Amino acid sequence: MTFLRLVAVSCLWFGLQYWAMLVGYSFGGSARFDLLNLPWKVAASSLAVVFPVAALGLWLAVSWGPVIWVVAAGAQILMYGVWSSVYGSNNLVVPMHSAVVVAYLAFRAALWLQQRRKAQEIRVDLP
């Protein structure tokens, strides 16, 4: 639960960064929505919506939270990893999202193994 909430806070931060960029609060107003090229308009406006939604889903620990986060993180990985000629490079985003994926999968595997062990225990509660 704590891990999901930490990821939720980071998603909210990413969403706020995209909103600040789109309304002209960050980068000295040079990255406002009306000044961006088409690929950045699509990516920034989509991620400005998807990241806060993912943050809400992760904070509430609902099943769709990690799914929305994977969509948002995947979009950023594609932006900065695959299409770096269009969006530029960000050397921190791709490894950080990858580390979160590995940690999440490790936690899910640990929970699965724990549930499996509990199911295999011999029960003597029958009369």
Image (spheres, rainbow, N blue to C red):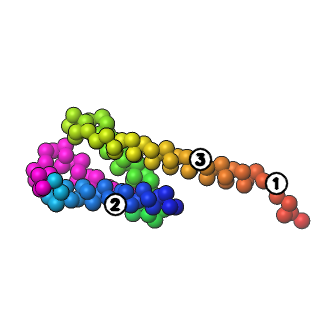
The dot on residue 33 is: none
Q: Secondary structure at mark 1?
A: loop
Which of the two labelled residues, at mark 1 and mark 3, occupies the earlier sequence position?
3
Residue range highlighted in magenta:
28-55
State the image coordinates of residue 52 (x, y, percent, origin top left): 33, 60
Q: Residues within 10 Å of mark 1 (few under 14, many from 20)?
A: few
State the image coordinates of residue 60 (x, y, percent, origin top left): 46, 65
State the image coordinates of residue 85 (x, y, percent, origin top left): 21, 34
Residue at numbered disc 3: 109
Instruction: Look at 49% across and 44% down and name the residue there.
Output: 102
Q: Quadrant of residue 5?
A: bottom left
Which of the two labelled residues, at mark 3 and mark 2, occupies the earlier sequence position?
2
In the image, taking residue 117 as reference, residue 95 lies left or right, namely left
Residue at numbered disc 2: 12
Q: Nearer the viewer, residue 85 or 34?
A: 85
The dot on residue 122 is: 1
